[in-house]
Amino acid sequence: MEDVETVKAEALQIMGVFQVLPRLVVFDLDYTLWPFYCECRSKRDTPYLYPHARGILRALKREEIDVVIASKSPTPDIATTYLDKLSISSMFVAKVPVLNLRMEYFHTPQAFPPLRWTNKTDHFQRIHSRTGVPFNSMLFFDDDNNNIQGVIKRASIVSKMGVTSILVRNGVNLGEFKEGLAKFSQKWNASQNMQKRRN
């Protein structure tokens, strides 16, 4: 297992390669940041993250890139407990679950109705409306291809969202982090070139 500070340093080095970085990075929880489903565990259990997750989160925080959780967990109370037990809750600008207002908070104290088993597209609409960050300035990591496809391809509204999305196979790691930043940078540069041609 790699040391958190080593992973953080490697993540910072990876970030340093790219001229443009996302303003906001969105993570799913189950099988993305940690290797289990919350609903299959209890609040008394001791949670743990995938080996690279904490270092990547710390690197993003160091570079002042906002980090958000978007999870459809049916047990957001357990997820919240785990985030607290792992001492990572403060790293997130926002948490958008489906059934519980407790996790749904942002820098502003105003709450809004909880999501009810909606898709990630609805999560991103809420994240955008609360943070003001454009979709094309977001990077999303999730283990569920249905969520990735939903963000990328679903209906005309979603295809216009522009969120860069990465499918995570065995938890977020430095390889997928680099892939996500490369894909984000490539999309960003392509959109800037298109704008220049239009002008």
Image (spheres, rainbow, N blue to C red):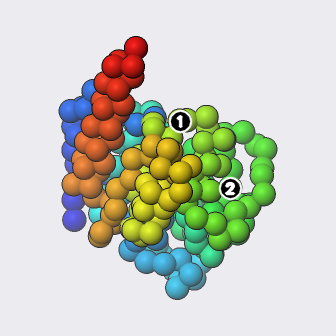
**Looking at the picture, how far across and down is residue 70, in whole percent?**
55, 58
Q: Is residue 91 left or right of residue 166?
A: right
**Front one among 38 and 23:** 23
Residue corresponding to mark 1: 134
Discs 1, 2 touching: Cβ within 8 Å: no
How many numbered marks are there? 2
The residue that appears at 29% across and 70% down in the rendered structure is 170
Which residue ends up furthest to the top in the rendered image? 199
- Work out whether residue 115 or residue 136 is closer to the camera in this orientation and state it: 136
56 relative to 46, above or below? above
What label sits on residue 51 in the rendered view?
Answer: none
Residue at image mark 2 = 104
| 15 over 146 or under it: above or below | above
Q: Where is residue 8 shown, x and y percent of the image?
A: 29, 45
Q: Which secondary structure lies at badge 1?
A: loop
Residue 187 placement (x, y as % from top left): 32, 38
Name the image quarter holding residue 42.
bottom right
Other-residue count near label 1 (Cα within 10 Å), few / some / many at <14 / 14–19 / ≥20: some
Estimate how packed mark 2 is, as few (under 14), some (14 to 19) or many (20 or more) residues with alpha carbons within 10 Å.
many
Going from the N terminus, do you reach mark 1 or mark 2 first? 2
Nearest the viewer among 125 and 190 is 190
> Would you say residue 44 is visible in this rendering?
no
Q: Amino acid at mark 2?
A: Glu
Answer yes or no: is residue 135 visible. Answer: yes
Label 2 residue SS? loop
Q: Residue at the spot x=33%, y=19% of the render?
A: 197
Q: Amino acid at mark 1?
A: Pro
Identify which residue is drawn at 40% across, 14% down: 199
Real-space CA distance between mark 1 and mark 2, rounded to the nearest whole angstrom: 20 Å
Check the image and report above or below for 180 versus 171.
above
The percent position of residue 139, horizontal first and vertical second, equals 41, 46
Splitting the image into 4 quarters, where does residue 171 fall? Answer: bottom left
